[in-house]
Image: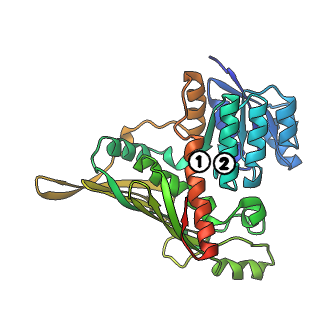
Amino acid sequence: MSKGFKVGVIGLGMGRHHLRCFHEHPSSKVVAIADQEPQRLKEIGDQYGIKKRYSDGAEMIEKEKLDVVSIATPNKFHCPLTVHAFKKGCHVFCEKPMAMTVEEAEKMNRAAQKAKRSLMINFSYRFSEMSFALKQQVDSGVIGNVYFGRTVWHRRRGIPKLGGWFTTKELSGGGPLIDLGVHRIDLALWLMGYPEPQSVFGSAYNVLAKEIARAQNKQYSVEDMACGLVKFKNGATLIVEASWALNVHQPEYMETALYGDKGGLVHRNTDGGYTMGAELYLEEGGSLFTKKLDRACVKVPTPYGEFIDSLVEGRQPIATGEHGLKVQKILNGLYQSAEQGAPVTF
């Protein structure tokens, strides 16, 4: 199928990456775009030769005959736009986090099922050579049954667009936990086989960012650091940590470590940047050794390519709405627990 799926992209901030990858795929073509910033809409529309341009994403969905809608808006609009797209018979590729609340995530999944259309969440940190290589190792049984893990993303100072929608709870639903932690939670759960969460106990703080925002006279209504403990129905435990402003050594510190009854693994960034490394910690014949994974041996699609490929092949994408719902339960549970000062059980 050559350029078979007609795609519309809503939100051209992060969405410009969606657009580029859908544009490059041989089985999809971006035919319409929507964004509230006229200059950005014009520049990107001109760059890709896209004539159908809208200031309102819902209007684009309503007027255009699309096969796929790609949503890269502030989190508040993920659910209503997704549901609207399904009612119009479209498949949906949605940015993370899936939604603002568990109820919204459930509504999105019900809409997908009713429309008999596909929903994929952009859990992009799965889609790297190191992540895929680790997944192959875990699925082969190398580390055995995972019973404990820790998944982290800290920034020394890295608040996105201070005063904008990222730091406005009404639009984002939260701060670094829902922005950064969502990636590390998904990666850990994916490697663990996506166990069902049972309960969480969390804490959230606004210490450093509060003073930074005050000094710049900018709005800031979310946390700057969150952490918590997740207990799964299979007995496993996961520690979660995320921050935009924390007094740590590296500018960016990302790490997901999982420990099983046969071995352990770690996926972490190197040199405080976005290059990833991975190791396995194993025992054979009574000897302990460390195995570094070679990133050159695994072919990895982009999330956008995976979604189109799944539609072409008539299968579920590997990052589903059901996965998004489990992550949403953990995110919202941690926020609720932090607010109440008590554990939350699902």
Q: Where is mark 2, residue-wise?
A: 105
In the rendered image, which quarter contains the C terminus? bottom right
Q: Residue at x 81, y 78 (%)?
A: 217
Q: Secondary structure at mark 2?
A: helix
Counting other residues with Cα less than 10 Å from the Cα at mark 2, is it few (<14), some (14-19), or many (20 or more)?
A: many
Give the image location of residue 293, x and y in percent: 33, 48
Residue 52 appears left or right of 287: right
Q: Residue at x 42, y 43 (%)?
A: 132
In the image, is residue 60 above or below residue 178?
A: above
Quarter of the rendering containing residue 30: top right
Residue 5 appears left or right of 257: right
Residue type of the residue flagged with mark 2 = Ala
Answer yes or no: is residue 100 visible: yes
Residue type of the residue flagged with mark 1 = Gly
Give the image location of residue 300, x and y in percent: 47, 37
Furthest residue toward front: 345
- Contact, mark 2 vs mark 1 (Cβ under 8 Å): yes
Q: Nearer the viewer, residue 25 or 240?
A: 240
Give the image location of residue 150, x and y in percent: 42, 64
Quarter of the rendering containing residue 306: top right
Quarter of the rendering containing residue 316: top right
Q: Residue at x 62, y 24 (%)?
A: 26
- First-in-chain label (2 vs 1): 2
Q: Where is mark 1, residue-wise?
A: 324
